[in-house]
Amino acid sequence: MSIVSELEEVKSCSSHFVLAINDTLNVISGKWKLPIIGSLMYGKKRFKELERDIAKITPRMLSKELKELEVNGIVSRTVHPTTPVTVEYELTASGESLKQVLEPMVEWGVQHRKRIFGK
């Protein structure tokens, strides 16, 4: 079955549609996962760089969310044998494919902010 026909089948049934939404939300749910993914869309980053990019995230929460994203195949972690050890995080191909989801979300967010706050 081709991906197009599979998507059409999912879209034609509300229970399959909801299941697909739940699968997506299980991977990207929470306050911090999408900001982490958004930051990594600009390239590889070390832990402290991510921490600086994402205001108000605690190191403990960043570590937890990165581990979950790694388990779900969205982020890869590379340890470089330097002194001290350097660890870099980057999006996998699956993580990169979320760009097509995030860009419309960003566009909607900008438009919504203008409508609500006039900014």
Image (spheres, rainbow, N blue to C red):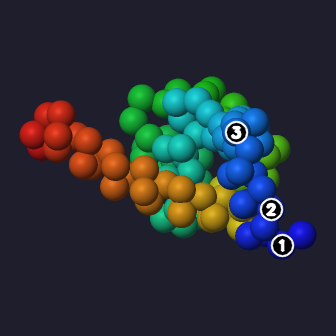
Q: Are marks 1 and 3 in contact (CB under 8 Å)?
A: no
Q: Residue furthest right?
A: 1
Q: Which mark is residue 6?
A: 2
Q: Nearer the viewer, residue 69 or 14?
A: 14
Is the residue marked by circle 2 packed among few (<14), some (14-19), or many (20+) residues within 10 Å?
Answer: few
Disc 3 residue type (three-letter) = Ser
Task: Give the image location of residue 35, x and y in percent.
Answer: 49, 44
Task: Give the image location of residue 83, x and y in percent.
Answer: 72, 57
Q: Is residue 3 above or below residue 19?
A: below
In whole angstroms, how far apart are the C-alphas of marks 2 and 1? 6 Å
Question: Which circle, 1 or 3, is nearer the viewer?
Answer: 3
Which element is circle 2 on? helix
Residue in the picture at 27% in, 49% down: 110
Q: Which mark is residue 14?
A: 3
Is the residue marked by circle 3 packed among few (<14), some (14-19), or many (20+) residues within 10 Å?
Answer: few
Q: Which mark is residue 27?
A: none
Residue in the picture at 52% in, 30% down: 31
Sequence-earlier tag: 1 or 3: 1
Task: Give the image location of residue 70, x and y in percent.
Answer: 76, 47
Disc 1 residue type (three-letter) = Ser
Disc 2 residue type (three-letter) = Glu
In whole angstroms, how far apart are the C-alphas of marks 1 and 3? 20 Å
Image-based side of 66 in relation to 115, left or right: right
In the rendered image, is residue 62 in sight?
no
Q: Are marks 2 and 1 in contact (CB under 8 Å)?
A: yes
Q: Which mark is residue 2?
A: 1
Q: Nearer the viewer, residue 102 or 56?
A: 102
Q: Quadrant of the C terminus?
A: top left
In the rendered image, is residue 53 in sight?
yes
Which element is circle 1 on? loop
